[in-house]
């Protein structure tokens, strides 16, 4: 109850609409959706002997802007705003530098000023070149861990960068803008932001240029001219007054913790732990509590873990982390966050079994996603159980035991990422790294009352993971809330040139709607009645309630063509694609290891071999997949008729363990009705808790006590994760608020 109350208080604060005096009229902005954009406060532009001075710039004004920018930066940090820094510069080989930018000024007739150009050696290093001393931000304004830094090759912040994607990933709609120079990168970035739908407000005292007498005022006036053609301009003090009133009391620990550290209340959500650590809580205290909880839960369910990191090792890691980051105001975003890992994901020096002893090995290198969360301060707790070979949606196919739902020992946990969902659902860890091929990262969270997020395939590196169907596999994230899942996604998303399925860093991004009714409305589709007829009675009732909730949130129910989703789902196991599960295994694996395989897995693999699928059939299925993918793209089209999200039950029903053991293959197949299409069609998806229902409503037995969770899944088009997650987050908050 304490954690829920804290969450609700935070939501109330973050939902506030703030307002400051500005030109042409008051600038209103929602705290939760506003970022500070600090543009190009680099040594090359602000310090003597840098690029700016070499090009003839007067440094007096730009240097004077450092102090007010620092005031603004500290106030925005204190109020919890997203912080984004930009740095203009180019790759060392200058491959991203247009020739016009490189030579135009130096090639001017009678030029005596531009004697050094981009890439030439100056006293601060090669001019405007990434990695050089002069390219970095001045000491007074250095980014803190977790703040976004965008390296841009142009004057505007949006050209050929990921800034739009990163802002959308954080659900940012409003920008407070500062930086240099006013007439160039500052004004250009505000104009670019305007084209993409952002509401922007420049802060007068925190921007300057090399010739303010001629250009600053006219540049600012152009921004707010004609009733705010490009945005707003405000003074610094009104903004400081508003932000300072939101900042928490200044009792945050710095280089040493307080004499009496705060007690740990057991809340493992990311914001709760982040705030507790800033207030002086020791990660050692959290690890002690986590292992006590794990020991107690082992008596409830002994099949959660395949390998539990020794408590002593976890404590040593926590102590080392506290030593590494003594300043509690500059902690990485995952500092002290405990997490688990599906045992198909490599961790150097730890066995990877994929719940299949013949495949067990001890890797010398860790999976990319594991290294990334460790780098950001997370603490590894253990490797979790899964359906053998990551094949199945029930959680009943492991030689290491059958985990059960945290809601009831009679009901399945879901699979294949069974232990991941139970470890988060039982509050043993904050998050878990899982995988998803046919729904493995969505169904188990649905059966354990937590969030399961499957990003667009190829946007998180899959390197270092034992594949199930490599062309369809992806990393999945199991968390307590959608907000936590989004935070992890922001940390883990990146292009991996060594992963052959990794998608390019840059992609087309749709505009945002920052104001007006469009800012909160969205269009959603649902399966037709004949598809939903497969659902249990409580699932149908709860799904209808979900539709009503979405409409109250501003959702507009919109007709869709369901056929591509249904047909793509059928391709996964009724077509030739299932053969890739055999292709992911060594040659002669079945013949050599039949006795070591789970009986259901062996039956499935034998059935695949008996099909004797041909290359002609495989090509026909690939052609069908391409057709269905194009048809699904039209459902999510960037057009009036397109929807923003497709909403489905995560699973049609919730089986008991006994029911699955009696009919393992058919019962498993039913569970994938609404998940199988996700990776075939290259969609993103997130399973979100949508309430609870009485066990006896499902079982029909009045004597069955307790409740079971219901979950819905939001799906959207390839690389539309940001839009989907924000709608899902709003729904998640609405459900939690009751």
Image: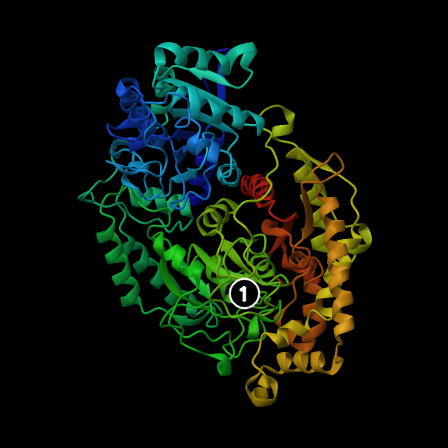
Q: Nearer the viewer, residue 615 or 285?
A: 615
* Vertical placement of residue 491 versus 79, above or below: below
- Does residue 714 show up? yes
- Does residue 534 show up? no
Identify the residue at image location x=62%, y=83%.
599
Tally of numbered discs:
1
Left of 726 or right of it: where is 107? left
Question: In the rendered view, how is the structure colored?
Answer: rainbow
Identify the residue at image location x=65%, y=32%.
521
**Rendered location of residue 242, percent (x, y):** 38, 20
**Rendered location of residue 369, percent (x, y):** 44, 58
Identify the secondary structure beneath mark 1: loop
Q: Which residue is mark 1?
A: 417
Q: Quadrant of the C terminus?
A: top right
Packing grade of label 1 (10 A; few <14, some 14-19, many >=20) is many
**Rendered location of residue 719, percent (x, y):** 60, 47
Left of 687 or right of it: where is 532? right
Q: Nearer the viewer, residue 116 or 730?
A: 116
Q: Quadrant of the N terminus?
A: top left
**Rendered location of residue 266, percent (x, y):** 37, 51
Q: Nearer the viewer, residue 167 or 256?
A: 167
Give the image quarter of residue 280.
Answer: top left
**Residue reaching furthest right?**
530
* Vertical placement of residue 513 versus 322, above or below: above
* Vertical placement of residue 680 versus 515, above or below: below
Left of 545 or right of it: where is 468? left
């Amino acid at each position: 109850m304490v954690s829920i109350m804290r969450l609700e208080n935070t939501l109330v604060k973050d939902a506030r609409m703030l307002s400051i005096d500005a030109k042409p009229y008051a600038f209103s902005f929602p705290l939760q959706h506003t970022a500070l954009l600090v543009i190009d406060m680099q040594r090359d532009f602000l310090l003597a002997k840098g690029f700016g001075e070499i090009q003839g710039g007067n440094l007096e004004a730009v240097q004077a802007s450092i102090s007010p920018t620092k005031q603004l930066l500290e106030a925005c940090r204190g109020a919890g705003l997203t912080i984004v820094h930009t740095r203009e510069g180019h790759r060392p080989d200058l491959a991203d530098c247009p020739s016009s930018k490189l030579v135009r000024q130096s090639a001017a007739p009678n030029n005596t000023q531009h004697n050094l150009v981009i890439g030439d050696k100056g006293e601060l290093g090669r001019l405007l070149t990434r990695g050089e001393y002069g390219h970095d931000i001045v000491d007074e304004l250095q980014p803190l861990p977790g703040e976004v830094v965008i390296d841009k090759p142009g004057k505007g912040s949006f050209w050929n960068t990921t800034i739009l994607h990163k802002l959308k990933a954080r659900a940012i709609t409003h920008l407070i803008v500062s930086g240099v120079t006013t007439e160039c990168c500052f004004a250009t970035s505000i104009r670019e932001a305007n084209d993409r739908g952002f509401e922007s407000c420049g802060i007068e005292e925190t921007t300057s240029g090399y010739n303010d007498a001629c250009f600053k005022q006219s540049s600012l006036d152009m921004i707010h001219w004609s009733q705010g053609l490009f945005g707003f301009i405000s003074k610094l003090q009104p903004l400081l007054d508003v932000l300072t009133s939101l900042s928490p009391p200044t009792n945050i620990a710095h280089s040493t913790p307080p004499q009496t550290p705060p007690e740990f209340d057991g809340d493992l959500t990311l914001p709760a732990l982040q705030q507790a650590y800033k207030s002086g809580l020791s990660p050692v205290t959290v690890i002690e509590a986590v292992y006590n909880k794990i020991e107690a839960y082992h008596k409830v369910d002994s099949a959660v873990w395949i390998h539990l990191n020794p408590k002593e090792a976890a404590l040593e890691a926590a102590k080392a982390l506290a030593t590494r980051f003594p300043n509690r105001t500059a902690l990485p975003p995952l500092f002290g966050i405990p997490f688990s890992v599906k045992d198909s994901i490599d961790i150097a020096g730890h066995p990877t079994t994929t719940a299949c002893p013949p495949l067990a090995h001890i890797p010398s290198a860790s999976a990319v996603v594991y290294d990334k969360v460790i780098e950001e301060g997370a603490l590894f707790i253990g490797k979790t159980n899964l359906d053998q070979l990551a094949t199945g949606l029930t959680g009943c196919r492991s030689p290491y035991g059958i985990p059960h739902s945290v809601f009831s020992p009679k009901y399945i946990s879901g699979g294949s990422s069974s232990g991941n969902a139970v470890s988060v659902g039982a509050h043993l860890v904050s998050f878990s790294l899982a995988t998803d091929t046919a729904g493995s990262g969505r169904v188990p969270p649905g059966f354990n009352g937590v969030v399961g997020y499957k990003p667009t395939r190829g946007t998180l590196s899959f390197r270092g993971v034992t594949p199930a169907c490599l062309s369809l596999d992806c990393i999945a994230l199991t968390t307590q809330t959608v907000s936590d899942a989004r935070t992890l996604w922001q940390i883990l998303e990146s292009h991996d040139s060594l992963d052959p399925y990794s998608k390019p860093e840059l992609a087309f991004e749709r505009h945002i709607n920052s104001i007006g009714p469009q800012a909160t409305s969205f269009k959603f589709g649902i399966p037709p009645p004949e598809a939903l007829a497969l659902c249990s009675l409580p699932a149908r009732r709860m799904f209808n309630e979900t539709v009503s909730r979405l409409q109250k949130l501003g959702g507009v129910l919109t007709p869709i063509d369901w056929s591509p989703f249904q047909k793509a789902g059928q391709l996964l196991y009724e077509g030739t694609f299932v053969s890739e599960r055999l292709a992911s295994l060594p040659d002669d694996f079945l013949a050599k290891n039949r006795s070591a395989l789970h009986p259901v897995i062996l039956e499935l693999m034998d059935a695949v071999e008996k099909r004797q699928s041909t290359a002609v059939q495989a090509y026909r299925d690939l052609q069908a997949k391409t057709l269905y993918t194009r048809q699904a793209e039209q459902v999510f089209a960037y057009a009036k008729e397109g929807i923003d999200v497709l909403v489905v039950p995560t699973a049609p029903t919730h089986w008991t363990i006994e029911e699955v053991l009696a009919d393992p293959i058919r019962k498993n197949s039913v569970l994938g009705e609404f998940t199988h299409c996700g990776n075939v069609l290259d969609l993103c998806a997130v399973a979100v808790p949508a309430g609870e229902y009485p066990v006896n409503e499902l079982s029909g037995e009045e004597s069955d006590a307790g409740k079971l969770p219901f979950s819905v899944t939001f799906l959207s088009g390839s690389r539309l994760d940001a839009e989907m997650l924000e709608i899902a987050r709003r729904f998640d908050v609405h459900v939690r608020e009751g």
